[in-house]
Image: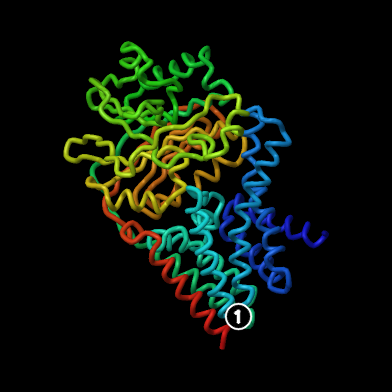
């Protein structure tokens, strides 16, 4: 029992390390210690599951806030939901450690664990619509292996992170050799980060990003809707930038329920301005949609409907209606938008800037965004993400999603603008660096500039396929070596 508790705590420590500045470097040391301990254990699967369970419990504790504080579900049921989700997610890394545990040689362990980790992380992002949140990949935006994101994606970053941790733990080399080898690998990875696969297009765009900071418990209250709409009305009216962006469900009622006068008040006043804001709409089947709408001075010119929906929040898995009925906020089945929606076009005097829209959870799935960018009939030059994380209170969820957004910009080679309700509202350049941001949990208006980029990274062209093939081949090699 004491050993299990220590492994649980070590998993929690590793997830906490990622939250620190330069957490992508620090977590490698924590993983190396765990790997050193776990490969000595007969019950590898059990204790690696306990470690991973502690990791996810600490990383995803904010789910409790959405269920208990916002949804008004009883505390025991809310806590049980966090435990159940963490227990499920812990199966994937535990399976990766179990596979690599059987390898005998140190090189087989290094290559085998890094590869099995990637394969199970990919699987975690696919099963039951996927939940790849809180992975090692996003830790590397400020870590040693960010340079691989534009080539092999986040899974490539995770491969090198786990590979180096295993090498430091299991290699028979001396300390000096390990230091030189690590320095060489890290230096080469950083050199990759100097390569730019995309280039600027057009002039920098002046942008206003709005952060309303409206509490989720009141967001759908009819008496509170006008206050929210009023904030965005006044902010748009007083803005003089080329683009104004308001967050997810900035208008928390169906857009068709608004009268013409109210809709007109949300339109920009200048002919060279555009507005993008989150609203609830309806699709052709009559289902509500979580949408982003684009407005210019004369009319509504664009609508994007969220494609990758959140289980339990935006669609109800079969057999779980009882769980949704426990919530004290309006939820239901939303309509799913197409994966092939065209980008929003922002007119410049000499260029047309194509803006790909994402709503909240969609920036978790790098392979889906890369596929959208690759297959779109109109090339993407800029990402815009509309988010509302008020569901999760004053937690670390906004920081976690900001890391994911930064990783997406590195993978795709184009910048990201984030307009959020409670934070973190930010402008991110094509290299994943934050240009400007607002403080969390404060109402604010961020005026900034962003340079759009054109082109495609190797990751956009090929997606996760290369790192999955490499990992599968290395697993086969390690298995054959082990058999010998």
Q: Secondary structure at mark 1?
A: helix
Which residue appears at 62% of the width and 58% of the height?
91
Which residue appears at 42% of the width and 59% of the height?
153
Q: Is residue 2 left or right of residue 338?
A: right
Q: Nearer the viewer, residue 400 or 45?
A: 45
Where residue 219 sits: x, y (%)? 53, 22
Which residue appears at 34% of the width and 12% of the height?
259
User: Is 483 located above or below residue 321 in the figure?
Assistant: below
Where residue 235 sits: x, y (%)? 40, 21
Residue linked to disc 1:
106
The N terminus sits in image quarter? bottom right
Residue at the limit of the structure toward the front, as seen here: 319
Toward which corner of the image does residue 81 lie, by quadrant?
top right
Q: Is residue 339 left or right of residue 386?
A: left
User: Is 234 located above or below residue 90 in the figure?
Assistant: above
Q: Nearer the viewer, residue 400 or 74?
A: 74
User: Is 24 located above or below residue 295 in the figure?
Assistant: below
Q: Is residue 205 left or right of residue 136?
A: left
């Amino acid at each position: 029992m004491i050993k299990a508790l220590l492994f649980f705590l070590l998993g929690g420590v590793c997830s906490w390390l990622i939250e620190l500045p330069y957490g992508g470097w620090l977590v490698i040391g924590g993983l190396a210690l765990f790997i050193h301990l776990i490969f000595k254990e007969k019950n590898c699967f059990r204790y690696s599951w306990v470690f991973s369970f502690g990791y996810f419990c600490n990383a995803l504790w904010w789910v409790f806030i959405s269920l208990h504080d916002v949804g008004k579900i009883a505390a025991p049921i809310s806590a049980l939901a966090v435990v159940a989700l963490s227990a499920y997610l812990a199966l994937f890394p535990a399976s990766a450690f179990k596979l690599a545990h059987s390898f005998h040689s140190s090189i087989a362990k290094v290559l085998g664990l890094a590869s099995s980790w990637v394969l199970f992380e990919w699987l975690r992002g696919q099963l039951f619509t996927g939940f790849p949140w809180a992975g090692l990949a996003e830790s590397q935006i400020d870590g040693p292996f960010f340079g691989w994101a534009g080539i092999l994606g986040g899974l490539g970053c995770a491969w090198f992170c786990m590979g180096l941790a295993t090498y430091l733990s299991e290699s028979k080399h001396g300390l000096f050799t390990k230091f030189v080898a690590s320095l060489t690998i890290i230096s080469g990875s950083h050199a990759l980060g100097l390569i730019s696969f995309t280039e600027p297009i057009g002039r920098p765009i002046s942008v206003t990003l709005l952060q309303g900071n409206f509490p989720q418990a009141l967001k759908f209250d009819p008496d509170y809707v006008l206050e929210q709409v009023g904030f965005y009305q006044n902010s748009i009216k007083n803005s003089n930038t080329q683009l104004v962006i308001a967050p997810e469900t900035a208008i928390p009622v169906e857009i068709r329920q608004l009268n013409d006068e109210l809709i007109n008040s949300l339109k920009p006043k200048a002919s060279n301005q555009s507005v993008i804001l989150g609203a609830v709409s309806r699709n052709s089947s009559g289902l509500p949609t979580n949408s982003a709408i684009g407005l210019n001075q004369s009319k509504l010119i664009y609508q994007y409907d969220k494609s990758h929906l959140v289980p339990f929040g935006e669609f109800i898995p079969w057999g779980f209606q009882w769980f949704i009925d426990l919530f004290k906020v309006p939820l239901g089945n939303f309509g799913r938008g197409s994966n092939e929606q065209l980008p929003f076009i922002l007119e410049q005097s000499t260029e047309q800037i194509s803006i790909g829209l994402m709503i909240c959870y969609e920036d978790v799935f790098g392979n889906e965004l890369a596929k959208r960018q690759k297959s779109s009939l109109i090339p993407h030059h800029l990402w815009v993400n509309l988010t509302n994380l008020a569901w999760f209170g004053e937690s670390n969820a906004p920081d976690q999603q900001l890391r994911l957004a930064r990783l997406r910009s590195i993978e795709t080679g184009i910048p990201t603008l984030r307009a959020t309700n409670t934070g973190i509202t930010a402008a991110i350049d094509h290299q994943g660096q934050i240009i400007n941001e607002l403080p969390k949990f404060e109402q604010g208006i961020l005026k900034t500039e962003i340079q759009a980029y054109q082109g495609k990274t190797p990751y956009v062209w090929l997606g996760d396929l290369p790192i999955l093939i490499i990992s599968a081949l290395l697993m086969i090699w390690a298995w054959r070596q082990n058999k010998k």
